[in-house]
Image (cartoon, rainbow, N blue to C red):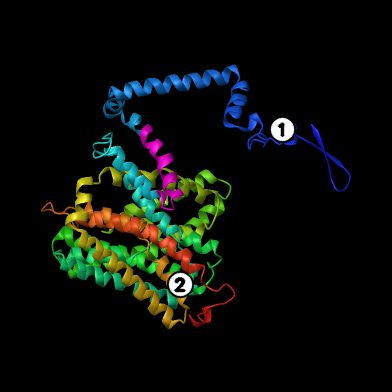
Amino acid sequence: MADETTDSGTTNKLPTHAAAGVPSSPNSHISPSTTIAGRLANAVVGLTLWDGLIILSIIIALGAFLVEWQRGLVMEYFRQGRPFDRFAVVLIALVFLPQQFERIKLPGMLGLILGGVLLGPYGLALILKVGEVGQFFSELGRVFLMFVCGLEINLSDFRRYARPSTLFGIATFLGPMIGGFALGLTFGYGINASVLIGSLLASHTLLGFPIIDKLGLLRQPFALTTIGATIFTDIAALLVLAVCLSVHMSGVLDWGALFGLFGSLAVYSVFVMGAIPRIGNYYFRIHHADEIGQFQFILAVIVICAVGAKLIGLEDIVGAFLCGIAVNQVLHHGAAREKIEFLGKGLFIPAFLMAVGATLDLPAFFRTFSTGLSFVIGIIIVLCLGKFAAAYLTGWVYRYGRAERLSMWALSLPQLAATLAATVTAYNSINAAGERLIGEQVVNAVIVLMVLTATLGPVLTEWFGRQVPRDSVSDSSPSRT
């Protein structure tokens, strides 16, 4: 090594090649252990005999799998095998697909629908038909989906901002409702089907709720107004669904039956919203330490409410939704609530979403873009304009700022849970003449709408939410409501 004397009189050692005027290699300072080859060598050296056996078994298993795959035996095994065997493939899709969709900022439920498509007759054809067990899980998932929607609604927020919530709820319901009705008539649908199409656009899913919470805007008046309006829009949309189904099955609009339906709904709603919280409070006081008993009680209440709604001529999802609102008054938090949500979100709801994908007619879905593209574009325009007009009107009346109005609009755009459940229910409704209430074109258009609004809604919510002044409070206060 050569010596170099610095200004301070100290001596630094220089590499020999530097002293000789030879330029040093840019990688000369890198230790062999930091290169890929070095790290690989270190990993191999550190392997135990057990680690080596594990790696060898994985290689052998993969090789055997590829050989069987090329011979077509793997797919044939699952197609001809037991439902339990196919359930293993369903679980693999359940674990991986939602995570991949969430990485690209899309809801995981869209990944589950895609998983159903991949496993269905137009994909790998592992599930040619959803059997009785699959139908049972799918129905439970549909009910649980609406129960969870109701569980997210807090009546205290609605009471606190009752007037702006009611105004926004009516406006954001009627705008898309009227526009969807006109659109349905324009494309040749009957009055009953057109009314239903309008109701499908009237509700919304608060997909941007976590974003508003993250931005610290959850207690802002515009956010509470939007959350409170969800109660009105969801209940009104489900009520319209019940009426349309009744007319479709009977073939006529019987005003006596209609008033009877409204009366039954009123009595049923009072019972569910009034009696269940009191019964629940009494039960949980007695069994406050029995988490399993609490879980079983909630599960029984959900199913009873769903079955009770069917008994009086309503849809089971109406009962499940009202049950969710009632249970939320009893269980704001707690282990029993977490368990019931875990069961629904982890098993039943994914089963419903994958069943939707498995029964989706893929060729008809793509034909929608060629033969029914104008209908899809019309639905998108009606939804966006209707929700925007409602947010602007409510913001103007209660003097919300521009960013707050646009945030309300973005929050009310996504069409997911309630819309999908109502669409599937209407599609599966077949009258005595063998006619469905709505056809595949509407179902496919709703799925396109779900993908678009589920992507656009959260992005716009965060964009406009960041423009809301944090240090200012809107002129609308609880005292005005």
Give the percent coordinates (x, y) of residue 11.
85, 40
x and y, in percent, of residue 233 in the image: 35, 67
When the figure is inspected, residue 76 is found, relative to residue 349, above or below; the finding is: above
Highlighted magenta segment, given as a residue range: 88-108
The residue most toward the left is 433
The secondary structure making up most of the magenta span is helix
In this picture, is 453 found above or below 95? below
| Mark 1: secondary structure | helix
**Three-letter code for the amino acid on which mark 2 is drawn:** Thr
Coordinates of residue 34 in the picture (x, y in percent): 63, 33
Label 2 packing within 10 angstroms: few (<14), some (14-19), many (20+): many
Residue drawn 79% across the image and 31% down it: 1
Q: Residue 402 is drawn in which quadrant? A: bottom left
Relative height, residue 312 to residue 60 (above, below): below
- Three-letter amino acid code at the position of disc 1: His
Tell me which residue sits at (55%, 77%) in the image.
473
- Residue 454: image x %, image y %? 38, 57
Reading the image, the residue beneath label 1 is 17
Earlier along the polypeptide chain: callout 1 or callout 2?
A: 1
Answer yes or no: do the residues labelled 1 and 2 have beta carbons within 8 Å?
no
Of tags 1 and 2, the one toward the viewer is 1
Residue 302 appears in the figure: yes
Secondary structure at badge 2 equals helix
**How many numbered circles does the render carry?**
2
Image side of residue 373 versus residue 300, left or right: left
Comparing 139 with 219, the one in front is 219
Residue 238 picture quarter? bottom left
Spot the residue most to the front.
21
Few, some or many residues within 10 Å of mark 1 (<14, 14–19, 20+): few
CA gap, disc 1 to disc 2?
74 Å
Q: Which disc number belongs to residue 225? A: 2
